[in-house]
Amino acid sequence: MVTAVSTDPRAVAETVTDPELPTLTLADLGVLRDVRVHEGTVVVDITPTYSGCPAMGVMRADLLHALHSAGFDDVEVRTVLSPAWSTDWITDDGRRKLAAAGIAPPGPAPHRPAGPVPLQLGPTRRTASCPLCGSPDTEELSEFGSTACKALRRCRSCREPFEHVKEI
């Protein structure tokens, strides 16, 4: 049963931050898919950034906490897998927040053909401009950064290391 009359559940859900990228809200990240009231229950749909994302449980708990704290007693958080999340869903504001935090935002996601995905052997070629000085002359140090969705890079101009959200 919804008891919070003056609060919009979507507005509350849009304030919840990502546990792995706390400079972004779930809405900035594009993970927050839908918030609606159905038969007195606030129903929130979220999509993981990738299969097996360890942050999903924390996202769910944070959404429940925020909505319960705002006075919504009956809340259901559902995981929606289709369509699959893409870095293209990160908002322009989210991309600005990433860059301001020293994390290179992703470029456009690669186009994936319908049907089977062809196997590609060899290193993945990603590029990212330095979020600190803007130089495009950067190198990948590790395909994985502090989380599986980020790579560790270094700028060849200013020599500073930084993370880059990988395009998917």
Image (cartoon, rainbow, N blue to C red):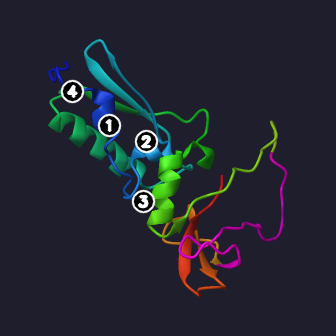
The mark nearer the N terminus, 4 or 3, is: 4
Q: Quadrant of the N terminus?
A: top left
Q: Residue at x 50, y 56 (%)?
A: 96
| Residue type for callout 2 | Ala
For label 4, the crowd category at 10 Å Cα-Cα, with few meaning under 14, some 14 to 19 and many 20 or more, is few
The numbered mark, 2 or 1, whose residue comes first in the sequence reads 1
Q: Which mark is residue 27?
A: 2
Mark 4, residue position = 7
**Left of 107 or right of it: where is 4?**
left
The kind of residue on which mark 3 rests is Leu
| x 63%, y 77%: residue | 142
Q: Which residue is mark 1?
A: 13
Report crowding for label 1: few under 14, some 14 to 19, many 20 or more residues within 10 A (C-alpha): many
User: Start and end of the magenta stretch?
Assistant: 117-140
The 10 Å Cα crowd at callout 2, few under 14, some 14 to 19, many 20 or more, is many
Q: Which residue is mark 3?
A: 21
Measure how far apart labels 2 and 1 are at the Cα level: 8 Å
Q: Is residue 90 magenta?
A: no
Q: Quadrant of residue 26?
A: top left
User: Disc 1 residue type?
Assistant: Ala
Q: Earlier in the sequence, mark 3 or mark 1?
A: 1
Q: Marks 4 and 3, how far apart in space?
A: 26 Å
